[in-house]
Image (cartoon, rainbow, N blue to C red):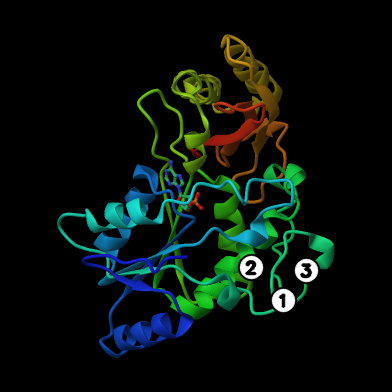
Amino acid sequence: MAKPTSKTIQVFRSLQQVRDWRHQCYLRKEKVGFVPTMGALHAGHCSLVAQSLKDNDRTVVSIFVNPSQFAPHEDLESYPRTLDSDLEVLESFEDKQIDAVFVPMKSEMFPSGITTDLAKQRGAFVSVLGCSEQLEGVKRPQFFRGVATIITKFLNVVKPTNIYFGQKDAQQCVVIKNLVKDLLFDVIVKIMPTLREPNGLAMSSRNAYLSPEVREKCGFIFKSLEAGKQLYEKESATGRSVSSDVLIQHMKGVMSETDIDFELEYLAISHPDTLDNLDFIRPEVGALISTALTVPKQDSNERARLIDNVLLAPI
Ligand code: AMP
């Protein structure tokens, strides 16, 4: 990789640089915010960065396409890598600048090496059991192990005061909260709302795989989730439990109105903290409605996988 440079922000490539910088922050008693990303930055990522700038004295953003969360058949090779424009995006915050971008080297993050082939992996990995296997974990059994492992490594190096994640990846938020709780990490996990395109499509680096036409039509995903939320709000106004099945049928009905060629992988209603499947939603508990589906990729016979969710807040 050519050496990444920025006019105004320090770019760290080595763990030692981050550790030295962190030590100086510690001596100055500064609060450090950390935003882990895989790059191809968009406004969703920027909202996390903006919150970190508000909450902390210093902010560091990492850009690293983490191989350990991809399966061999997934898009590790083709995942969008746009480091130069990402650095420009990170330079463009107006009131306050971020302090550093961490672009780690794979060899340092995985000193025992890393392959996407689970059977050939060697070394230490972190699993968060109980919330990693359902929903996203069904199709992507090694995904959250990879996420929990890389975040553990980052927490060990950056030692942030606050770490920022997006509600867009709802199950990831649950996994990280449990990781931090169970492994006694001294960090506050902050979850920011999902930023959306004007048609409601959740912003995602993978939206780059879509043609403008498909991207526009993918507004049907959020529209259907919102329809489920509205029906829930109407039904729960009586204070009684609401049937998940009724909501799911309603949302599937809204989804079926689109003329786009989509394949639904799951549409689920789960406990917001345990992610257990819920047959009925108790208003005092609320729920997470989440979905994954695939749509055609631009200029290819392959399909892009999109996820989205809405939270039904407890009353
Ligand atoms: P990624 O680069 O996809 O790993 O995402 C890095 C962080 O940005 C994760 O915490 C994501 O949940 C968050 N994020 C991604 N998309 C959005 C979005 N549309 N709104 C808010 N946060 C997001």
The answer to whether mark 2 is within 8 Å of ligand 1 is no
Considering every residue shown, the one lying at the far right of the view is 119
**Residue 95, x across and y down, in percent:** 15, 57
Type of amino acid at the residue the image marks with label 3: Gln
Residue 93 in the figure: left or right of residue 264 = left
**Residue 240, x across and y down, in percent:** 60, 27
Between 184 and 13, the residue placed more toward the observer is 13
Between 206 and 266, the residue placed more toward the observer is 206
**Residue 4, x across and y down, in percent:** 37, 66
> Residue at image x 77%, y 74%?
122
Crowd tier of the residue under label 1, counting other residues whose Cα lies within 10 Å: few below 14, some 14–19, many 20 or above: few
SS for dot 1: loop
Determine whether label 1 and label 3 are within 8 Å by CB. Answer: no
**Which residue is identified by label 2?**
149
Considering every residue shown, the one lying at the far bottom of the view is 27
Determine which quarter of the picture holds residue 97.
bottom left
Type of amino acid at the residue the image marks with label 1: Ala
> Residue at image x 54%, y 20%?
224
Q: Is residue 292 visible?
A: no
Could you give the CA–CA distance between mark 2 and mark 3, rounded to whole angstroms?
A: 13 Å
Residue 308 in the figure: left or right of residue 164 = right
Determine whether label 2 and label 1 are within 8 Å by CB. Answer: yes
SS for dot 3: loop
**Which residue is identified by label 3?**
121
> Residue at image x 22%, y 65%?
7
**Which residue is identified by label 1?**
124
The answer to whether mark 3 is within 8 Å of ligand 1 is no
Could you give the CA–CA distance between mark 2 and mark 1, rounded to whole angstroms?
A: 8 Å
Type of amino acid at the residue the image marks with label 2: Thr
Q: Earlier in the sequence, mark 2 or mark 1?
A: 1
Determine whether label 2 and label 3 are within 8 Å by CB. Answer: no
